[in-house]
Image: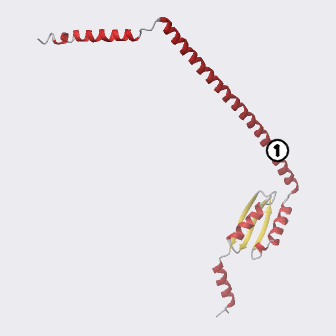
Amino acid sequence: MNKMNAPFAALPVAITLALILGVATISGCSKDPQEKYNDAIEQLKDARASRDDAQEQLKSQKDKIADMQEELNEAKAKLAEAGQGVDSANQAVDKTVNDEVLFRTIQRELLDKKTFDKAAISVGVQNRVVTLSGNVPDEDTHQQALKAARSQAGVKNVVDQLQVQDAEAEKKQAQSDKQPDQG
């Protein structure tokens, strides 16, 4: 065989394979038109049933969304109503609370509680801003004093100028006060 005939040598084999595949394909599609029609009808019925199921699920989800939207609207209305109540309460506090009332209320609370017996706290109020200054024995007392001031209705802000006394510094100060001056 020469080089020119080599590509054509495979040609009869390729044609034979193509014929075999063609016959196999045709024999596999040997359904008559009625069978093809029936299969198509079944596929159409299945597709319609799937579509109907999907539409039902979609409607169900839309109903759930509508219910949740209604609940959200109700919650928004309640929130707005509560906000109006807070605004009304703030307005009532603004009308009745002034700096003098705040000063007396906070000072009375700080003087009446045993927690503050060892503290020296001064209270100042200007435009409903409370300033606490002085000395407290420990951090717990410090935090309680701030909390007492902040918890009063009408207080806009609390300025913390309190200083926590160092227990060691107090002992040294007490000892130096007891020793006579040398000089």
Q: Amino acid at mark 1?
A: Gln
Q: Position of residue 108 (x, y in %)?
A: 84, 69
Q: Residue furthest right?
A: 96
Tell me if mark 1 has few (under 14), some (14-19) or many (20+) residues whose alpha carbon lies within 10 angstroms of its own: few
Image quarter hosting the N terminus: top left
Viewer-closest of 75 and 142: 75
Residue found at x 60% / y 19%: 49
Image quarter for residue 77? top right
Which one is nearer the viewer's eye here, 66 or 82? 66
Quarter of image, res 71: top right
Secondary element type, mark 1: helix
List x then y, in percent, for residue 6: 16, 12
The answer to whether 181 appears left or right of 127 in the picture is left
Q: Residue at x 81, y 72 (%)?
A: 111
Which residue corresponds to the image point at 56% horizontal and 14% vertical from the top-left?
Answer: 44
- Relative height, residue 29 to residue 182 (above, below): above
Residue 168 drawn above or below residue 157: below
